């Protein structure tokens, strides 16, 4: 597939060809024929090149001059602005609510406002004539009066809060929102156990059977240092094996209850993980009811996403936006979701009709790139190829994935790719 880069001509060889390097590079990267170089170019000229990168190196297919940027002084008919120009700030910064920097800036602004009000009161008292220093100005607080804690003067308005004070139901400044969790089923399960079973169940909740095994090893190591007899590993492991199904079920029920409570606000990936985990535990009647409800919720959300995806593709085809339709079909809501056959046929026909010979070469090649990456590439039949050498070269390279291009170029149509057969290799009992 061809690419477009900028190259710099470095020197001319005796046979007329030129050596070149990528713009900004140190060493020359190749040689280009003199017939491709535009007239009037010299060493040091920067050109736009269509190149093809292969195993043997970089081959220049076409060269064109880079359009120089127009200077404002050379533009005719421009309007001269009289006066000092104002420059807007290059970066606009918006601080998140509750951030320390925003609260600090608000404190500084409040302090400036208090200073301004204080200065204004001083001016009024000094210029009022006959007013004593202990009198208070109109609208200002009494001198020597008490102030509210935290530096703010006067009573607070309903719903307002001082800087650094956490709002009701919100954590302190700098804290991140915590994902909802539930421990109701785990606590209920622990309440039914005997006292000697609770430590084993807690280890199972932390990390399953491996966590119990590690805890036993650590306890025996500490007992050996203290000169005490080790614990019975077999008895503790047997207890862990007995408690493991109930602990695992209680842990899953807590996750499932959170998913049910959150509803559509629960992330789809986490919901899929909870539904998949239901197949790894031994469910009771309550657990089967919860698993069925979660499966129905997952199916409904996936179906809604799939319908929205198909509607987006259909609307793009009907409105003539073939490029958007091809880009949408490459991003299904689920990895295994496939486009229906009738819609795929309609999309391939629309893409082939859009790839005409009258289309500009750059737009045609961009559409070809998207077609090559789409799942309907082998059924797309382009109407034509632009009369451009770069476009024809791109069509030759893509003929293996879009077979209809080979017919337009007069080439042999390549066979379809072979099917991938996954074979299992069995080892003999003696090895191999």
Image (spheres, helix red, strand yellow):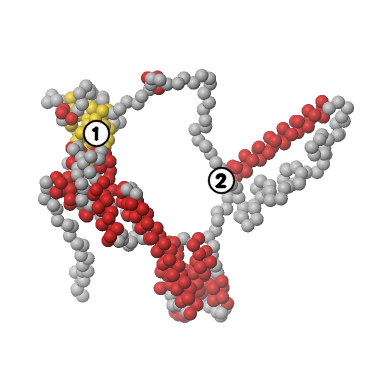
User: How many numbered tags mark residues here?
Assistant: 2
Q: Residues within 10 Å of mark 1 (few under 14, many from 20)?
A: many
Question: Would residue 327 be seen by someone viewing this image from the given angle?
Answer: no
Residue at the location (21% across, 67% down)? 423
Q: Position of residue 40 (x, y in %)?
A: 21, 21
Residue 49 image label = 1
User: Residue at image x 24%, y 48%?
Assistant: 353
Which is nearer the eye, 65 or 361?
361
**Image x and y of residue 102, in percent:** 60, 42
Q: Element under label 1?
A: strand
Q: Position of residue 168 (x, y in %)?
A: 65, 55
Query: Which quadrant of the figure contains the N terminus?
Result: top left
Image quadrant in which the C terminus is located: bottom left
Calculate the distance from the C-alpha at mark 2 to the C-alpha at mark 1.
46 Å
Q: Which residue is mark 2?
A: 96
25 in relation to 188, above or below: above
Instruction: Decide which of 223, 276 is in the foreground and name it.
Output: 276
């Amino acid at each position: 597939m061809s690419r477009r880069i900028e190259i710099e001509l470095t020197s001319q060889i005796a046979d007329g060809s030129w050596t070149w390097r990528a713009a900004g590079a140190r060493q020359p990267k190749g040689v280009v024929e003199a017939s491709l170089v535009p007239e009037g170019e010299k060493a040091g000229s920067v050109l736009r090149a269509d190149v093809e990168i292969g195993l043997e190196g970089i081959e220049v297919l076409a060269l064109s001059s880079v359009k120089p940027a127009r200077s404002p002084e050379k533009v005719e008919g421009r309007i001269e602005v009289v006066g000092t120009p104002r420059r807007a700030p290059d970066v606009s910064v918006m601080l998140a609510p509750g951030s320390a920097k925003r609260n600090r800036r608000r404190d500084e602004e409040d302090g400036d406002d208090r200073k301004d009000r204080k200065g204004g009161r001083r001016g009024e008292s000094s210029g009022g004539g006959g007013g004593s220093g202990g009198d208070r100005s109109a609208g200002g607080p009494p001198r020597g009066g008490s102030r509210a804690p935290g530096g703010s003067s006067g009573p607070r308005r309903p719903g307002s809060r001082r800087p650094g004070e956490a709002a009701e139901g919100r954590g302190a400044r700098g804290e991140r929102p915590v994902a909802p969790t539930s421990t109701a089923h785990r606590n209920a399960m622990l309440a039914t156990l005997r006292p000697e079973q609770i430590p084993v169940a807690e280890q199972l909740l932390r990390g399953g059977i491996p966590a119990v095994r590690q805890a036993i090893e650590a306890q025996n190591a500490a007992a050996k240092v203290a000169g005490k007899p080790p614990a019975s590993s077999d008895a503790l492991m047997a207890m862990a094996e007995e408690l493991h199904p109930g602990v695992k079920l209680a842990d899953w029920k807590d996750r499932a209850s959170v998913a049910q409570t959150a509803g559509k606000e629960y992330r789809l990936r986490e919901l899929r993980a909870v539904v998949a985990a239901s197949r790894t535990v031994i469910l009771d009647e309550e657990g089967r009811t919860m698993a069925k409800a979660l499966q129905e919720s997952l199916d409904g959300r996936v179906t809604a996403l799939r319908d929205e995806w198909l509607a987006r593709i259909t609307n793009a085809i009907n409105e003539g936006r073939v490029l958007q339709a091809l880009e949408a079909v490459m991003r299904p809501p689920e990895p295994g979701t496939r486009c229906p056959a009738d819609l795929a046929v309609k999309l391939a026909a629309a893409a082939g009709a859009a790839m005409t010979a009258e289309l500009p070469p750059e737009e045609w090649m961009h559409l070809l790139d998207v077609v090559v990456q789409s799942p309907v590439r082998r059924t797309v039949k382009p109407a034509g190829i632009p009369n451009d050498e770069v476009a024809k070269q791109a069509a030759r390279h893509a003929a293996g994935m879009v077979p209809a291009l080979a017919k337009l170029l007069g080439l042999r149509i390549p066979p379809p790719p072979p099917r991938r057969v996954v074979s299992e290799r069995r080892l003999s009992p003696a090895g191999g």
